[in-house]
Amino acid sequence: MRDDQDLAAPVAARLQEGVDHEFDPALVERAREAVDSGDRETLRGLVVDLHEADLAALLEALDPQERPRLIELLGSDFDFTALTELDETVRVQILEALSVETVAQGVRDIDSDDAVYILEDLDDDDKQEILGQLPMPERAALQRSLDYPEESAGRRMQTEFIAVPPFWTVGQTLDYVGETEGLPETFFEVFVVDPTYRLTGSVPLDRLLRTKRMVKLSEVVTPDRHVVKATDDQEDVARVFERYNLISSPVVDDVGRLVGVMTIDDVVDVIQEEADEDLKALGGVAGDEELSDSVWAIAKSRFAWLLLNLIAANLASFVISLFEGELQKMVALAVLMPIVASQGGNAGTQTMTVAVRALATRELRGSNARRVVAREVLVGLFNGVAFAVIMAVVVFARFGLADLGAVIALAMIINLVAAALGGILVPLGLQKLKVDPAVASGPFVTTITDVVGFFAFLGIAALWFG
Amino acid sequence: MRDDQDLAAPVAARLQEGVDHEFDPALVERAREAVDSGDRETLRGLVVDLHEADLAALLEALDPQERPRLIELLGSDFDFTALTELDETVRVQILEALSVETVAQGVRDIDSDDAVYILEDLDDDDKQEILGQLPMPERAALQRSLDYPEESAGRRMQTEFIAVPPFWTVGQTLDYVGETEGLPETFFEVFVVDPTYRLTGSVPLDRLLRTKRMVKLSEVVTPDRHVVKATDDQEDVARVFERYNLISSPVVDDVGRLVGVMTIDDVVDVIQEEADEDLKALGGVAGDEELSDSVWAIAKSRFAWLLLNLIAANLASFVISLFEGELQKMVALAVLMPIVASQGGNAGTQTMTVAVRALATRELRGSNARRVVAREVLVGLFNGVAFAVIMAVVVFARFGLADLGAVIALAMIINLVAAALGGILVPLGLQKLKVDPAVASGPFVTTITDVVGFFAFLGIAALWFG
């Protein structure tokens, strides 16, 4: 053990340097050589002391066909938890290349929440084959977690926890915790349950340590205010953790029986994932697009959103074609019209971004929606007037036509108010229809601002000059 | 105590229902009446058992002038931690309305990291006046935290922690923890330090509980692999917590002396904040814009970004004006040109979104930038060809001109490749120049796609038909 640590120590030190955790290329090279030559001992020395996240980074730095070989070579020295740190694409590739026995052994050795995370992306057949290799209690626990809906607390919870009856004393509990084998690797509290395993509450370790040994748990247990149900959506669970600064929370089934515990590190991943999805969705990218995806997969997935936008753009183009006569008479209209549309598009995106984010964080709710809509419309009006004045001056300076300046000014005000309305009402409406506002708002909002922008500008021009 | 809990219990239950934590309007009404009539006991009964987050929500639901009154009325029963859960604007308003004595007493009673969070937004004068009211050890600890740079670990850390020498036994340590007054409210580990307070490592509580009492700490202590420096940026700290699934981490000064501890709940806030800032920045909204800001403040802050976009739009408009002759000859060009520009803008936004996010999460680095650029260009080329074909068909169907179809097809390919290049190179370039890519990329990318879109389409048309 000592030897391995000494070998690995400089590696750990190197990884610690700098915040971007770039790998020392020499480590990757040495690991690659060891994998290629089947040199188990050298490989073990290189990786045994690596954190699972660094082990995952090493795997990603290797060529795809080397990754499963590294795992098979290391055998039980490979910590399968590392697989949870990989992109889904890479993880599935590796799992499909590994033997069922290796995967079954690997998931047995790790926490149940990590095992579920690894198994849930596999085909049903593969999943069942792997589960079939596991002894009964583990198999049943994993199967139960997998039976909960995707992205539910039941999928993310750890089924290892410490549960004791309320009549135990603090001393008894401390002795039990100190002497029992097979307890979870890390834990922050003990749970108190009744004979039917219904949750009474929990006692954090620090409170346990600061209470006299003869005190009964029933006297120090606090009922958890925010108990997570196994069927709760992981995003809702994340909001509760965030709002109440929780470190861990018991998870109960439909009748209130303790079935697992969810910890903040899983929640951090959920928060990151959700923020990631919202951000990407607003930019027109699928939430699960990853840097390791193939060109073809990415092109395909982005195509759909662009196609929607193309339809919107053609609609705007149709609006323009209604005014061909005016455009022919006054080519300056063609020169200026994209400015009105683009300014509306950008203002609409600002409002939409704020609305989508506020809906995601639950800051925007039924109770304050009216106030926020009114505020956005006023902001649109203020900025509409500001840019109306600026563009009137610019157009007059450029074309010497005061009329045209007035037309663009009016159109600008109309479009910025329309942008504000669209930017807030579209996400609110989609939310009501149970459609994710982050995914679907963009094309609607830009359609509105393009159509209104072109129609207002060219329409007013037609009336004014026609 | 019992009485208060009973009174408050239904409130807590109501808050727990539903995931959006909407307030029972009746609670707000009753709290408001109690504040207005100065009925301290009723108010206390209503709020004493509320979680700090719910107390904050109640404060926000009240009118601005009622908020400080609630706090003064409750006196020492008001938990100042609640103020950390408020929007900055609301918090500062409340703090400015409170007496220096009230704030000084309030921050004394809470954890140091929360106290710093509350104090850091105040004017220097107010800050010093409040600190002046505090007894020496607290004052010095808060001052030291406030002396660290903004958004550093030193500002977010808690200065209360348990540090013991390596020659202590597990039993000694457990007794110390169990019997000493004034220890931090929650803790997950004890830190082991040498006589000069340099950090040796830490022992998690669960390991402490599972080790025999006579064992020396020096035998069970693990050196922390990832020690946070007080001057580290909070965003970098968040990445380390995320990557290594940490629950807490010691914070050391420049010479390695233990000065505090950072816990995951603070990190969750940082992660949320950073994700929030990136998402808003991409949408052209200031990172600190809050739902509680005034119309005027929001209009002003969004104006700047829209002005930048207006300049970009005028540049694009100038490009169009170079082709006035062609537009006059063929009005179909005016009808179609926004399609090319808009499709490029959307494709550029997709690439930019992915690039900005990957830079923020450190997934995109110097070592893989070349590969990602190549991938994006290929994706742009694929989709460019796809939309070229679609638009060629649409244009032929609409205008009966095969030539015009060919022109728009060519322009579409050029602009989607330009969009891919701009979408990835602009964020990478800004990052190199130490400018936040999330904030500044948007206007540059859309300028590129507008200018290239109009120039390619109208330019090719001029050559083809001219």
Image (spheres, coloured by chain):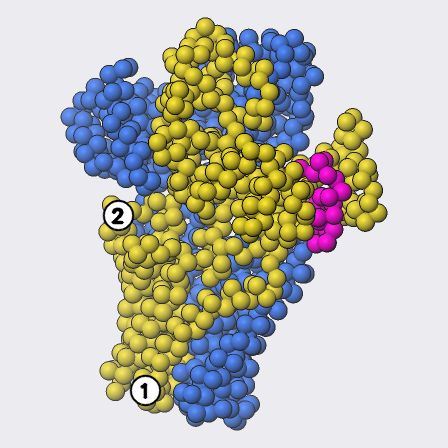
Chain colours: A yellow, B blue
SS for callout 1 = helix
Residue type for callout 2: Gly
Q: Which amino acid type is shown beneath numbered disc 1? A: Glu
Please tell me whether residue A182 is drawn above or below residue A109 in the rendered image: above
Q: Is residue B4 above or below residue B316?
A: above
Residue on which the image places disc 2: A366
Asked whether, in this view, residue A55 is left or right of residue A389, the answer is: right
| Residues at discs 2 and 1 both on one chain | yes
Q: Nearer the viewer, mark 2 or mark 1?
A: 2
Question: Residue B390: where, in percent of width, then height?
Answer: 48, 79
Is any part of residue A55 visible from this angle?
yes
Left or right of B108 in this view: A104: right
Q: Please name the residue shown 59% across and 11% down the image.
A: B173
Residue A326: which numbered mark, if any?
A: 1
- Residue B25 placement: quadrant: top left
* Residue drawn at point x = 20 percent, y = 22 percent: B42
User: Could you tell me residue A240's position as x and y percent?
Assistant: 39, 36
Q: What is the x, y in percent for residue B223?
A: 68, 26
- Magenta segment range? A58-81
Instruction: Name the chain under label 1.
Output: A
- Residue at (28% x, 39% y) in the render: B22
Q: Is residue A108 left or right of residue A277?
A: right
Whether A260 is among the magenta residues is no
Asked if residue A391 is positioned above or below residue B400 in the image, the reply reads: above
Left or right: B402 as drawn, with respect to A332? right
Secondary structure that dominates the magenta span: helix
Residue A26 visible, this angle: no
Neighbour tally class for label 2: few under 14, some 14-19, many 20 plus, Cα within 10 Å: few
